[in-house]
Image: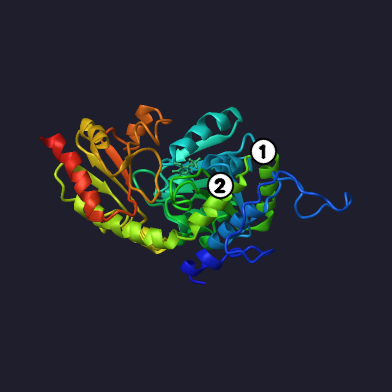
Amino acid sequence: MNPRTAILHGGPDRDPFTGASSIPVYQASTYHQDDPQRIGKYEYARGGNPTRDALEQTIAALEGGAQGLAFASGMAATCSVLLLLQPGDHVVVSHDIYGGTYRALTTLFRRWQLQVDFVDMTQPDKVRAVLRSTTRALFVETPANPLQQITDLRAMVAIAQERGLLAIIDNTFMSPYLQRPLALGFDVVIHSATKFLGGHSDLLAGLVVAREEGVGKRLRAIQNTFGAVLGPQDAWLTLRGIKTLAARMDAQQAAATAIAEWLQTVPPVRRVYFPGLPDHPGYALHHSQADGPGAVVSFELAEPVAARSLLKRVRLMLAAVSLGGVESILSYPATMSHAGMPREERHRRGITDGLVRLSVGLEAAEDLMADLQQGLKQEEG
Ligand SMILES: Cc1ncc(COP(=O)(O)O)c(C=O)c1O
């Protein structure tokens, strides 16, 4: 099925009991059992809920995996996946990983004795160089947040398969419409569905898909035990958001491409990071493993003060944390997405105080450019 069709019909596309066009919100915590010796499919809402099930089946179909799981947030999803590992295990993580994931690995999971190496995964040799006998997993994010470096997914799968490692990827920035890592051999895909999947900046959700049933079952047990499940209302909103994923992504990435090209010509902008620009160092690689550049453009202004005042001066855009909504969102990684990373570490990774990240929404590109222009111009004057 073409991904555009799969988005609408790949999972449950109507209520099996009534034929309703929308799976209802099953707002219930427990389920009556006709026979206490033969528990039915649903027993208690932490273990399963029909609205959540529909979402879990939908994301499994879109990513092409055996098992989908819905969590209360992207971080609940990430931490639940990390619980697949044991204390003492070693994991190799992309050095441009989302700040919240960095924080989880360097606080909670450090106390839990998980050994972590953050490496530049754009260079597979650097991954090989840190492998140990105790290495159990690779954790990848590409395009990386916020500098949009591209990691070679096939090279990561080759390393993982050679060494019997679990290959995990955070696919939030692409969504399954643009990038399907399980088809390339990844084992587990994570999404902050708060972003493009939900798409309307009105919910918090996390999704996970396991390629194989065995890993899926282990994750199901973690989900039920740890209990960070997604509620039925937010599962319904996420399902509703997913229905327009293709249409939104197409429009948003077309506008993002136009804005990225334009930003390259604007004097206070020192550098533009966007995998849709042919001079992006990962352009060819990205297009060999994804169907489009996405809708997030990062750019660096020479002066940190100019970056901060741009956020104060934009009128159409939200100046906020998050991305992937129908409205454009301008954010400042230094104090927002990467606030959890020590300043020195952040600078070492190129996330400077002049860096701004723009998630392009559904507004007309020309209006967004005018908004940026007025925000930058005032600073110049
Ligand atoms: C790439 C990425 N992964 C994970 C998360 C965490 O998701 P959530 O905010 O839904 O917990 C985010 C949130 O910004 C993100 O951008």
Q: Residue 36 carries which label?
A: none
Q: Crowding at label 1, few (<14), some or many (≥20) Cα neighbours within 10 Å?
A: some
Which residue does the numbered mark 1 point to in the structure image?
A: 226
Q: Does the residue labelled 1 lie within 8 Å of ligand 1?
A: no
Q: How many labels does the image show?
A: 2
Q: Is residue 274 left or right of residue 105?
A: left
Quadrant for the C terminus, please: top left
Q: Residue 234 carries which label?
A: 2
Q: Which residue is drawn at 19% across and 43% down?
A: 269
Q: Are marks 1 and 2 in contact (CB under 8 Å)?
A: no
What SS does tag 2 mark?
helix
Q: Is residue 130 left or right of residue 277?
A: right
* Colouring of the image: rainbow
Task: Kindly give the residue lying farthest to the bottom in the view shown.
Answer: 1
Pinpoint residue 76: horizontal percent, then vertical percent: 57, 40
* Residue 132 showing in the rendered view: no
Pinpoint residue 183: horizontal percent, then vertical percent: 53, 63
What SS does tag 1 mark?
helix
Quadrant location of residue 24?
A: bottom right
Q: Which residue is drawn at 59% across and 63% down?
A: 11
Q: Nearer the viewer, mark 1 or mark 2?
A: 2
At label 2, the amino acid type is Asp
Q: Which of marks 1 and 2 is nearer the N terminus?
A: 1
Q: In this view, does 192 lie to the left or right of 39?
A: left
Q: Does the residue labelled 2 lie within 8 Å of ligand 1?
A: no
Pinpoint residue 277: horizontal percent, then vertical percent: 27, 56
Q: Crowding at label 2, few (<14), some or many (≥20) Cα neighbours within 10 Å?
A: many
Pinpoint residue 265: horizontal percent, then vertical percent: 16, 50
Q: Which residue is drawn at 20% across and 40% down?
A: 375
Q: Is residue 303 left or right of residue 191?
A: left
At label 1, the amino acid type is Phe
